Image (cartoon, rainbow, N blue to C red):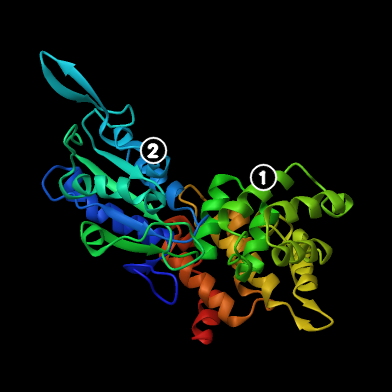
Amino acid sequence: MSSSGPALFGAKLTADGVQRFIERVTANAIDGTGERTPICIWGVHGIGKTALVEEIASANSWKFAYVAPAQFEEMGDLHGLPVVEANTTTFAAPDWVPTEPGPGILLLDDFNRADDRILRGIMQLLQRGELVSWSLPPQWHIVVTANPEGADYSVTPLDDAMLTRMLHVSMEFEHQVWARWAVEAGVDERGIAFVLTYPEMVTGSRTTPRSLTHFFQQISPIDDLRANWDHVHALALSALDPEAATAFMSFVNDDLNELVSPSQILDGEWTATEDRIRELAHDENGIRLDRLNAMTVRLYLAVAKDDFAPTTHQGTNLVSFLTSTVLPADLRLTLHRDLVNNAGEEVVVVMRDRALAELTLGSM
């Protein structure tokens, strides 16, 4: 199967959308009442397909089993080795095969990097949930990940007989979805601010959400990035495309790593905080929407957490931020809408402010 560009299949969704798709499709199979048609998640490398499937299993308290078919050298790795018992040849299933009843997910990772012969052997597993030697236990569902065909990937093209045995969805990067995950995962705040400021950088051959996360883990112990310029630059070049590495070092030079944090906005003395935001929001070239957007998105991610309950001071500061003249009307409207739709009731109550309501209505 050849094409002029990368071959992806199914709806193009963010990680949130893929999660909802998997949970809804597997619902009947997991409870044992419906078909368990395998799901294939297509996407470029490093976008987080594998981690997402693991997180879905963990979030739903499902069992999880993992195997990378590209590691299989022969069919015995798939269906097990023959054993003679009472003059009858049976097979001892491989140790990666799930044996406990579900609910559970069996992940066939980087599926189309396997040899064509191995893929042909997996066809029955996709169709019936079993091979000649073993069967998936009840309430287990197969999820597959794959890299695009027709791009610079060492993959085996899938024919129509293989494709029609699965449901398909394509996963795309969305910087705000990634940032929410990164906040929860404890990724370095300076790294999160960089991605929110330069989301277009997460499109390179080496600059992926995975490589960025690795890089941010390496710089996390470094308090002063500029004082350790040479080492930080070497780390950036070791993990990222040259263009992304250059952008990050410019980010460091430009003091963007010193953007006002959510905790400073919520917990600080508001007058001083607003002065700092105003200072960062303008330079000799005019308004810096990239900085304001990065600060706004980070604040949203902090306030929209399920366990966030604002103190009186934090509520006052949140309203002050939303009503500040330094905040452009479109950013105010977007932040207000997103918090009303996604934040907890205590946050929504705080935002029932007359001045804020008038400003918001005036932005529509």
Name the image quarter holding residue 20. bottom left
Which quadrant is home to the N terminus?
A: bottom left
Where's residue 92, x and y in %?
A: 24, 24
Q: Position of residue 143 (x, y in %)?
A: 31, 49
> Does the CB distance between marks 2 and 1 fall below 8 Å?
no
Q: Quadrant of residue 98?
A: top left
Q: Tell me the crowding category of disc 2: few under 14, some 14 to 19, or many 20 or more residues within 10 angstroms, Cα based.
A: few
Task: Label 2, secondary structure: give it.
Answer: loop
Which residue sits furthest right? 227
Residue kind at label 2, given as amino acid type: Glu
39 over 334 or under it: above or below: above
In this view, 336 is above or below 133: below
Mark number, residue 89: none
Residue drawn at 18 percent across, 39 percent down: 130
Question: Which residue is pictured at 33% across the width and 51% down the height?
Answer: 116
| 161 left or right of 291 in image | left
Nearer to the camera, 146 or 61 = 146
Which label belongs to residue 217? 1
Which residue is label 2 attached to? 73
Q: Is residue 291 above or below residue 106?
A: below
The answer to which of 75 and 298 lies nearer the viewer is 75
Q: Residue furthest top?
A: 86
Give the CA separation, mark 2 to mark 1: 34 Å
Q: Residues within 10 Å of mark 1 (few under 14, many from 20)?
A: some
Using residue 119 as the reference point, say whether residue 307 is left or right of it: right
Q: How many marks?
A: 2
- Residue 220 in the image: state x and y as whole percent: 72, 45
Residue, x 29% and y 32% (percent of image)?
A: 97
Query: Can the viewer see residue 320?
Result: no
- The local secondary structure at tag 1 comes to helix
Between marks 2 and 1 in the image, the one whose residue lies nearer the viewer: 2
- The amino acid beneath tag 1 is Gln
